[in-house]
């Protein structure tokens, strides 16, 4: 059973979470997963932490650094809310505990990098699992494919750059840190899901405005211009972000050392190219921020640049017959999907046109909820309620009704036995019946002519939206529709 590390310690975050543990708390070390010049990484099969779900690893330092700065790195994660912590865990292998021994930092506990960030690479010694570092984006695509590395297309490269910029913006704005040593080996990428970039080796970051106890370094070919290389800052992070965008979008010969913004002329639009020139210039204040790069790359990809906003929602009626539709008209900004929920039924339509209408059928009186979404957030509104009226029911009469028919004017009634037959009379309008001699002729009475009955309201049209019927005045002339 994994050991749950939650003992008392002098190193605690403001939330009360223990930030430091000892080597004994780690349990038995598992397989060695990696080895570099400064540290060795081991699997931790016996350790589980309540605030860091998932597999964990131990990064053991060769030369123990001062632990105070590492505690600040761990505490910055603990200061986030649940949503922010989940976002950080998706974009960075962030330290979750400092391992201390005799008052010195022996290493840090990190989340294990997920499998999709690894490749099966063909080497002289055979096939091996290898981290998919972003430096593989800088080589020519055909060369990458030969050794088992992916060769993303132009759109995928823009998405990788977008996620790199978005992740760095989160670190700058939410954690208030300077990453410092951004380079080709301390970020990995995937193409099957988002986020597509994960930052690694995050234990060397420092809070903005705080002098690093251990000097932050620059990797070869990633150094900023002039004296900036001596003291790293957000401005140097912005410079290195510009290098990454340029090199990711222009793979090929000398791709890993390229610093010429002009090589991106066929990939970025005019505004993007101008941003790249400012990013790689010598004026730190003129460099685009990570958030500005995120906005520009989103526009190039046709993605939302802000959370959606539901501008207006309207219903075409407040009453409806059960089973008949209500038309819901909506207007939204930056929406990719519109969801209309009514009486347990859900309708989804494309929100990118910005406005539209959706019919929904209600069986019971209630409100209508409209929700708009994109990958940056959601917005919703409730309208109504809509009153649902049951359809009218017609019951048969329970008493007999006499049958009434029109008299026939074409044939006389049959003769009554014992009486002489009556004469045939033509009672059509404009004719006179024959009369005996000496008797004055009298016109037959005029028969009433059936006429249309007037009714002031059309209830069916009000509830269903069907065309209205004609209304007639008493003199027989049309009164309107």
Image (cartoon, rainbow, N blue to C red):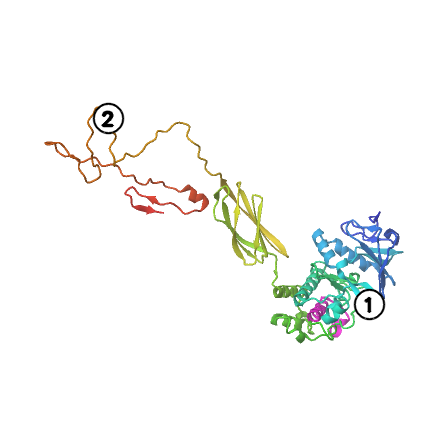
Which quadrant of the view contains residue 255? Answer: bottom right
Q: Nearer the viewer, mark 2 or mark 1?
A: 2
Query: Where 271 falls versus 325 (above or below)?
Result: below
Mark 1 surroundings: few (<14), some (14-19) or many (≥20) residues within 10 A: few
- In magenta, the rendered stretch is 224-249
Residue in front for this viewpoint, 116 or 159: 116
Q: Residue furthest front?
A: 417
17 lies left or right of 314: right
In the rendered structure, find residue 198 and report the number of the disc placed on it. none
Mark 2, secondary structure of its residue: loop
| Magenta stretch prevailing secondary structure | helix
Binning the other alpha carbons within 10 Å of mark 2 as few (below 14), some (14 to 19) or many (20 upward) gives: few
Q: Which residue is identified by label 2?
A: 416
Q: Residue furthest top?
A: 418
Q: Residue at x 25, y 35 (%)?
A: 411
* Residue depicted at 12% across the width and 33% down the height: 440
Judged left or right of residue 474, residue 97 is right
Residue 337 % position (x, y)? 59, 55
Compared across the picture, whether 346 is left or right of 390 comes to right
Instruction: Provide the residue designation for mark 1.
Output: 123
Q: Residue furthest left?
A: 438
Which residue is pictured at 23% across the width and 28% down the height?
Answer: 415
257 inside magenta stretch: no
Magenta run includes residue 227: yes
Q: Secondary structure at mark 1?
A: strand
- Given residues 25 and 198, the one toward you in this image is 198
């Amino acid at each position: 059973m994994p050991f749950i590390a939650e003992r008392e310690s002098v190193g605690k975050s403001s939330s009360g979470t223990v930030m430091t543990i000892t080597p004994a708390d780690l349990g038995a070390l598992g397989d060695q997963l990696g080895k570099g010049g400064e540290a060795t990484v081991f699997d931790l099969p016996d350790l589980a932490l309540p605030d860091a779900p998932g597999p964990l690893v131990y990064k053991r330092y060769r030369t123990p650094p001062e632990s105070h700065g590492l505690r600040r790195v761990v505490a910055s994660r603990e200061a986030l809310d649940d949503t922010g912590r989940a976002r950080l865990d998706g974009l960075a292998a962030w330290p979750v505990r400092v391992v201390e021994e005799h008052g010195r930092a022996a290493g840090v506990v990190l989340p294990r990098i997920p499998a999709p960030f690894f490749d099966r690479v063909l080497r002289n010694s055979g096939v091996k699992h290898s981290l998919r570092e972003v430096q593989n984006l800088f080589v020519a695509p055909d060369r990458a494919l030969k050794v088992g590395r992916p060769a993303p297309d132009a759109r995928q490269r823009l998405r990788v750059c977008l996620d790199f910029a978005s992740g760095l913006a989160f670190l700058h704005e939410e954690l208030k840190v300077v990453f410092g040593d951004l380079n080709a080996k301390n970020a990995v990428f995937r193409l099957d899901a988002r986020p597509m970039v994960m930052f690694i080796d995050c234990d060397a970051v420092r809070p903005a405005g705080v002098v690093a106890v251990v000097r932050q370094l620059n990797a070869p070919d990633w150094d900023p211009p002039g004296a900036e290389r001596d003291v790293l800052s957000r401005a140097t992070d912005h410079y290195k972000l510009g290098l990454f965008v340029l090199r990711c979008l222009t793979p090929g010969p000398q791709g890993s050392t390229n610093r010429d913004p002009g090589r991106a002329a066929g990939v970025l639009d005019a505004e993007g190219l101008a941003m790249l020139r400012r990013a790689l210039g010598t004026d730190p204040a003129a460099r685009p921020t990570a958030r500005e790069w995120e906005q520009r790359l989103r526009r190039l990809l046709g993605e939302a640049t802000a959370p959606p906003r539901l501008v207006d929602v309207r219903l075409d009626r407040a009453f409806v017959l059960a089973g008949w539709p209500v038309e819901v008209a909506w207007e939204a900004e930056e929406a990719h999907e519109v969801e209309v929920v009514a009486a347990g039924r859900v309708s989804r339509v494309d929100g990118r046109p910005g406005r539209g209408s959706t019919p929904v059928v209600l069986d019971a009186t209630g409100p209508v909820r409209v929700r708009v979404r994109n990958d940056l957030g959601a917005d919703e509104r409730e309208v109504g309620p809509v009153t649902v009226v049951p359809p009218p029911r017609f019951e048969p009469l329970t008493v007999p009704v006499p049958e009434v028919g029109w008299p026939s004017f074409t044939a006389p009634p049959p003769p009554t036995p014992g009486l002489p037959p009556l004469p045939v009379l033509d009672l059509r309008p404009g004719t006179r019946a024959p009369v005996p001699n000496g008797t004055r002729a009298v016109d037959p009475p005029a028969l009433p002519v059936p006429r249309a009955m007037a009714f002031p309201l059309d209830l069916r049209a009000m509830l269903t939206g069907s065309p209205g019927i004609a209304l007639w005045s008493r003199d027989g002339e049309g009164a309107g529709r």
